[in-house]
Image (cartoon, grey):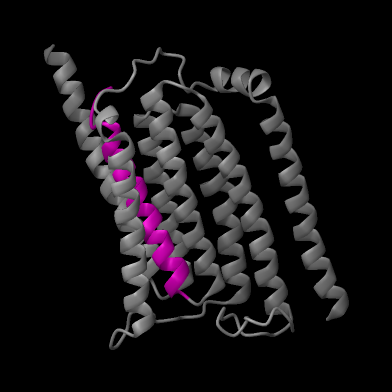
Amino acid sequence: MLGPGVAWYLGVAAFLFGTGALGVIVRRNPIIVLLSLEIMLNGGNLALIAVARHAGNGAGQIFALAVMAVAASEVCVGLGLVVAINRKRLDLDIDKLSELRG
Amino acid sequence: MILASAGNIVVWIVWVGAGFACLASGIAVVSFSNPFYSALSLIGNLGSLAVLYLLLSAEFVAAAQVLVYAGAVMVMFLFVIAYVGPRVETPWAGAPSWQAVGAVLAAGSIFLEIIVAVALKAGGRLSHSDHVNATFGTPGWIGRLFLTDHLLAFEITSIVLLIAAVGGVILGAHTRRAG
């Protein structure tokens, strides 16, 4: 395998996961929380694909594709919720949306 | 031999560029106050991740990443941000609140925990990877794998996508009736 070893990829994946977790914890806009969730999922995907290449096994790539499908579903439902909240004229702030009722 | 080492240097340069772009755009997504800029930097993040996938000989996943994320998911994000209207939020301005400090500490400890766990469990075995043949990661190979070994996962994925589409429609339609 040319270039850096698989440990470097795992380091980048861990950093991406930490960055996404930081965004999920600290941001209040639900759209940016969803964007940070995408970063966390992509960190997991990068680790899966790196280990799949390391082991020479295709199951990791299959799992990464399944994770992408789940991420697309999550964005569909999450953005649907954001649009629904916005239609009800509620404030888009997850600290103020803690009661789960309009 | 000279050709192999030249190729190695090229791969290292591409890796450093893509990895740095990936980390920098990830930080940019979290720290931009305007969600529109955050979404645009996530596109850069996804593009540089696709380059990393190509270096890991996952051609089909890289193509699917660009098509699904940059093509479909990001268009949806940008549309919703434009629909909702940009709400500027400044999480990092002024004196650092205890929330921000705690979040940075929590995220840093997650990062360190992953690194330590990987190093403890698999540190010695990550040095040399298995050799793979040229078909590894090609669309035909992925398709054959999906339809033979992982057929159940393939079908369940389609059901998950269907349920998500139905859920999106229900969320949109219900609020229209109620409002």
Residue B125 falls in image quadrant: top left
What x and y, as percent, mark residue B109?
32, 61
- Vertical position of residue A79 compared to residue B143: above or below: below
Give the residue displayed 51% in from the left and 80% down from the top.
B87
Residue B134 among those drawn in magenta: no
In percent of the image, x 62 and y 85: which residue is there?
A: A91
Residue at left offset 72%, top offset 37%: B156
Which residue is nearer to you in this view: B28 or A8?
A8
Q: Furthest-left residue in view?
A: B2
x, y percent for residue B165: 75, 52
- Principal secondary structure, stretch drawn in magenta: helix
**Rendered view: A31 above or below A52:** below
User: Does residue A49 appear left or right of residue B173 in this picture?
Assistant: left
Q: Does the magenta stretch include residue A3?
A: yes
> With B45 as the anchor, is A70 left or right in this view?
right
The magenta stretch spans which residues? Answer: A1-27
Which quadrant does the N terminus of chain B fall into?
top left
Which percent across, then down, holds residue A76?
A: 67, 57
Q: Position of residue B3 (x, y in %)?
A: 16, 15
Q: Which residue lies furthest to the right in this view?
A: B177
Q: Which residue is drawn at 57% across and 69% down?
A: B81
Residue B57 is at least partly visible in this image? no
**Image label count:** 0
**What is the residue that sits farthest to the front in this orientation?**
B120
- Residue B69 at least partly seen: yes
Q: In this view, does B26 lie above or below B133?
A: below
